[in-house]
Structures are given as C-alpha cells and as structure tokens.
RNA sequence: GGAGGGGUGGCAGAGUCCGGUUGAAUGCACCAGUCUUGAAAACUGGCAGGCCGCAAGGUCUCGUGGGUUCGAAUCCCACCCCCUCCGCCA
C-alpha cells in the first residue's frame, strides 16, 4: 500500500511511475485524492462535534453530582448524538472507499528499474555455468520421468484433474531429498530460521502480502470459512510479523520455509499442457526477510545470491534477469528472476523470483519497528524462492540425463538422495 | 463435539458486580538524569498506537462488530481467539 501522505504531496510523480508499469493511474489517483479530502473534512467536523459531546457529558456528570438539573444539557447532547451518528457513517464510508482504492494500487517501481512494457525488455544481469545445448536425441523431463517411473501424471489427473503431479518411488525421493538439501543449505550456511507454517491462511494474510483483493480468482479458497490455500509460503511466513512493532535489534529477520503452493492459474488453462512447468500444486522452499529500510537493497542482493548458490551447488546453468517496470509483480519495487536452463525443454525456466517490496507489504500489514529515536517505522520486506521444486527438478533430470537413460545425481545431493545415480531399467 | 474460565499498554496485572472527569492504578522491563572512578542500588523524570493539525492541541482505540445510554473498559447481543477439564482422533 502506498502512503496516502505521499500521494497527496506528489501525485504527478506517482502517476508517472505507475504509468511505467502499465497502470492507468490518472483517474485512480485523482479519485483517491478526492475521496481523501472529503474523508478528512468530514472527520474533522466529526471530531469537533465529539469534543463538544465529551465536554457536555462531563458537565452532566458534574452537575448531577452537585444536584443540579440537567435536562437541558441532556437533550442538547442527545441532538449531537444524532448528528454524530450520521457523520460517522459518512466517515466510515469514505474511509472504506479510500482503503479499497489504496489496496488496489500496485507498488511503485524502484527509480533505477529498467523501463519496459513486458518481459521482452528484461535485461540479463548475469549468466552462470555451462549451457548444455539442446539436441534432438535428448529427452525432455516428461519423457525421462515417465520412462523411469518417477512421475505418474495419469494417476495425478485421475485423482485431482489436470495440473497436478504424482511422484513415485525414486521420483518422490528425489524431490524429498531436494527439499531437505535446500532447507539445510539456507539454515546451516545462510543464516535462515526454518519455519513450517500453516498451509491455510485467512483473508487478512492475503491482503497483507498483496494477493487480495485483486487476485482472488487465482487463489484456492475454502468458501465456508473464508480461508485460502496459500499460493506461496510468502503469505503465512511474512504474516508472522503482521501488526507487530519489532525492536531494531531484531532486524534483519530471515525465514525459510518449505510448503506446497496452490494456484488456480485461472486463464492459463491448457497452455502449459503436460509436465511440471505450471501446476495447481507445487512445492517450494521460500526465503523471506524483514529488514531495516536502509539495508533492503543490499539484502535483496544477498537474498538473490542465497537462491543462486543453490543452482551453483547443483551445477545447473542459469541466468539472472532483472524485471522491467512493465513485468513487475503487483507488490514489488524491484525483482530479479533466476532462470535455470532446461536442455530437454530447450528453454529457460523461472525457478526463483527475488523481490524487494520496500514498505508496501509492511504498510498493508502494519509491520513496524522502533528505531533508535523511538519512532515507529515500517520495515521493508523481501522474499524469493530458494527455489521452486518442480522446475528445479526438470532442469536437474534434463541436465543430468545419461546416455544410458539413467540420471546422475549431483554430488551435493547424493548424501540426501542416498545414491549417485538413478538407474535406467534394463 | 460437551462444560467451564479468560481476552486491558512491551510484559505482568488492577479496574468490570454498583456506567460519569480512567487512555487506564501498581509492579517489572526500557530510556534519560542525579549520585558513583565505573557499575549496582537508591532517587527524579519519561515511556501504547491510529487519525486530523505547522504547532498548541483535538479525537479515536481496553479481542471484533452491533445495541442500550446524555455518557460504556464497565450493561446487553453476536462473532473471533486463547486456556483448563471431558469425549473423539492422527
């Protein structure tokens, strides 16, 4: 959520910057400002009336104690009460309208964010590792996984419909060992605290991190009790600190969590077809940071490196791109995507999206800390995947497929997987 | 699911029966100062958040929402959450 005070102060700058992310902001900001002005003027009127009422009520108390007659003051206050009720309703209404408008405006891109309309303008920041060339005699992950019996897509769709995967045998174990590896890496070497959160979250959480109110159709909801299946661990984990006032020494907070993620992928049905690339349910290890505003961009760099080190340790070729203004997510001010190379697919797959939200989420969830001077300031929040499991899985089995049909397990993963290879059946 | 108890400031904990100047006693923690070579102790002062305002100040908030009343932390209703016991269960 943007700061209404700032919108009041520099509406034109805000409009311009929202423009760069393809948001038609002029009307939105103007109606917001109109609403804000109206709200404040009614509120001021309401408050002065309240002051009057408080004073008179006090007077009634005193005069009753003194045994004096109060009928006249009482009827005056009663009359104030009627006017007050009407004003309160007006304030509430304006307040509501304003809040909804604010919640529907995305974050401002960072100053240095490359300007562009869509993903075609995303600059590549770096590349790492050897890019194994695609060739016709290489299988893609679906072919490999089905041939080796690692994944049973048919069983999954029988159980839950399209967009789900069922891992089996060594295929399931491979995913489990990856999860274990990822969490250990972040907790043992990178200073994150492991969290295992609820996978179900309430509406407040979803508003706090920015999924709601705008993207409800993308979420799996549990209608009868207004709950949602978390689309990412970002939601429950960031909300751990919702409505808190932290002390400055507690920062930075670094959490990592493995959870399944549930997404309806409304509108993208049929585009991904078979495979692990886009699913309704997938596992992910998430990294979440809550930091001092002065440090958030340094923390974004290190968070991105925390994710990159996973790919490097597994020896997977990847590139880091920076999202241009038009491709930024709703709540993000700056985002790096990590794309791992999948030689069988012959494409780069987004396995991690690392973002600095600055105070946008913190404002929505009222997440603050007390600075040295004793002032309460909004913290900055960040998160990134470290990483999404299915696409990592794809890159892994496509990169390490052997000529004999088996799969080599990268060294770092071997202790977790308990073997050096997945053998092809003879 | 049944029966009880409870949600008040960073924490603990009064106040709620008998509504009135109580945004809230007291203690602890924390911050500043006095004293001290330094520290501790003692003493003095400060110490919740939102909104409006340049400020002075005003206003709102005692789980949430509604109601009663001239006036609600205090009375009434609904809901949410937590705890204890019983039942059921991974």
Image (spheres, rainbow, N blue to C red):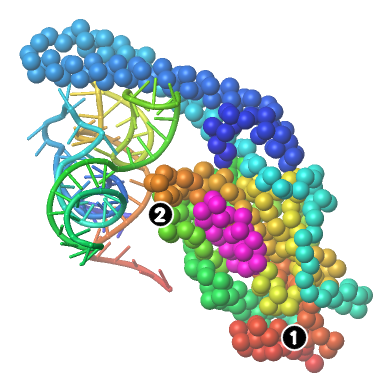
Question: In the image, which disc is placed on residue A408?
Answer: 1
- Span colored in magenta: A281-307
**Is residue A116 covered in magenta?**
no
- Disc 2 or 1, which lies upstream in sequence? 2
Q: Residue at x 56, y 55 (%)?
A: A295
Q: Residue at x 85, y 86 (%)?
A: A403
Q: Nearer the viewer, mark 2 or mark 1?
A: 2
Left or right? Give the position of A185 relative to A91: right
Of helix, strand and loop, which one carries label 1? Answer: strand
Residue B75 pos. (x, y %): 19, 33
Direction right: furthest residue: A136
Estimate the spatial distance between the alpha carbons at disc 2 and disc 1, rounded to whole Å. Answer: 48 Å
Residue A84 pos. (x, y %): 36, 17
Residue under circle 2? A247
Which of the 4 image quarters holds residue A280? bottom right
Of helix, strand and loop, which one carries label 2? Answer: strand
């Amino acid at each position: 959520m943007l700061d209404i005070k700032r919108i009041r102060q520099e509406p034109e700058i805000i409009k311009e910057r929202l423009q760069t992310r393809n948001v038609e902001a002029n009307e939105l900001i103007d109606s917001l400002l109109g609403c804000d002005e109206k709200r404040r003027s009614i509120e001021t009127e309401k408050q002065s009336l309240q002051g009057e009422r408080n004073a008179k009520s006090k007077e009634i108390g005193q005069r009753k104690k003194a045994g004096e007659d109060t009928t006249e003051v009482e009827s005056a206050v009663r009359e104030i009460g009627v006017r007050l009720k009407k004003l309160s309703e007006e304030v509430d209404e304006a307040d509501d309208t304003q809040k909804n408008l604010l919640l529907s405006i995305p974050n401002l891109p960072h100053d240095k964010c490359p300007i562009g309309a869509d993903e075609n303008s995303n600059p590549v920041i770096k590349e790492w590792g050897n890019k194994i060339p695609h060739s016709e005699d290489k299988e893609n992950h679906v072919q490999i996984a089905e041939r080796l019996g690692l994944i049973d897509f048919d069983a999954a769709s029988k159980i839950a419909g399209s967009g789900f995967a069922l891992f089996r045998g060594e295929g399931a174990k491979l995913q489990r060992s990856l999860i274990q590896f990822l969490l250990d890496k972040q907790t043992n070497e990178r200073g994150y605290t492991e969290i295992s959160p609820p996978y179900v979250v309430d509406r407040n959480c979803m508003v706090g991190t920015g999924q709601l109110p705008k993207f409800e159709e993308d979420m799996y909801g549990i209608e009868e009790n207004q709950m949602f299946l978390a689309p990412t661990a970002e939601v429950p984990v960031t909300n751990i600190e919702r409505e808190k006032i932290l002390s400055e020494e507690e920062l930075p907070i670094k959490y990592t969590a493995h959870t399944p993620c549930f997404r309806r992928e409304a509108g993208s049905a049929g585009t991904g077809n078979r495979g692990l690339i886009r699913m309704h349910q997938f596992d992910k290890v998430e990294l979440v940071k809550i930091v001092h505003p002065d440090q958030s961009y340094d923390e974004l760099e290190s968070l991105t490196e925390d994710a990159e080190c996973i790919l490097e340790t597994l020896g997977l070729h990847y590139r880091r791109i920076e999202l241009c203004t038009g491709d930024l997510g709703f709540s993000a001010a700056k985002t790096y995507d990590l794309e791992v190379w999948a030689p069988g697919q012959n494409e780069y797959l987004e396995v991690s999206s690392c973002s600095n939200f600055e105070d946008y989420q913190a404002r929505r969830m009222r997440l603050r800390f007390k600075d040295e001077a004793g002032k309460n300031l909004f913290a900055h929040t960040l998160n990134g995947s470290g990483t999404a499991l299915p696409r990592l899985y794809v890159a892994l089995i496509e990169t390490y497929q052997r000529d004999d049909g088996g799969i080599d397990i990268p060294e770092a993963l071997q202790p977790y997987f308990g073997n050096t290879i997945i053998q092809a059946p003879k």
